[in-house]
Image (spheres, rainbow, N blue to C red):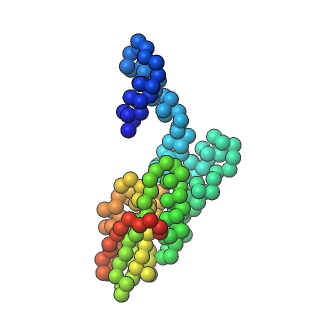
Amino acid sequence: MFGLLLVVGAASGPVQAASPMVAATVVQASVLAANTFQVKLLAYVARGDIAGAITMYQLHTGRAAPAWLVDLQAAYNVANQTAGRCQQVAQFIHTAYGKLGQTPQYIAFKTDETKPYMVFELANAKHASVSRTGYHVAVRVGDMIHDAYTGPFGMKLSDYLSRLHAQKGITWEVVSKP
């Protein structure tokens, strides 16, 4: 996509005798300047520094951080690592990544209704209750899964599935709503 933008940007201006490197640098600077703030916010979020993203937003705009960014910080709070909170947490995470220009997807994890309990194996080897209904939802951004159990760094789907347990196994699918 970036190469396409360079070609379009370079071809849309008047033809001048300049080196391709200079033309590419000028186009690259103008393309990147448009979303630099959003890219910086996303970089903070990707490093797991939501508090840093909030501070940067406040310093850059002179205003309080938007609710979606504050909600993202709250979504990863350990208090949300309990059964029944996943849908609200997923909505917060989905909204934030959408505002940051990403394409988040809701991922539903399901298990047999006769044994509806799911647990997540935490980093300290303890198990936290994820669901008592046989349904859990998280958010996928790229190849990473995000929810209160993964924290702001997220986790690869394969790693997530290796830590999410249910007596009758777990299936997953992309869904349109949490």
Q: Is residue 6 left or right of residue 73?
A: left
Residue 166 vs residue 26, the one in the foreground: 26
State the image coordinates of residue 109 (x, y, percent, origin top left): 38, 71
User: Quarter-wise, where is residue 154 in the image?
Assistant: bottom left
State how many labels appear. 0
Q: Can you give x and y, in whole percent of width and height, for residue 168 in the image? A: 30, 81
Q: Is residue 100 visible?
A: yes
Quick one: 122 or 96, which is closer to the camera?
96
Name the quarter where the N terminus is drawn: top left
Residue 172, compared with residue 155, is above or below; it is below
Residue at image x 47%, y 22%? 13
**The residue positioned farthest toward the top in the image shown:** 17
Q: Identify the residue at the far bottom of this view.
A: 114
Residue 115, relative to residue 100: is it above or below? below
Name the spot of residue 82 as percent of width and height, x first.
49, 74
Q: Is residue 16 above or below residue 5?
A: above
- Residue 135, image x, y percentages: 42, 76
> Is 157 situated left or right of 82 in this image?
left
* Residue at x-position 32% and y-position 74%: 170
Q: Is residue 129 visible?
A: no
Does 56 sit left or right of 148 as displayed?
right
- At x 38% / y 34%, what residue is drawn? 4
Residue pictured at 43% horizontal, 16% vertical: 15
Q: Which quadrant of the view contains residue 141?
A: bottom left
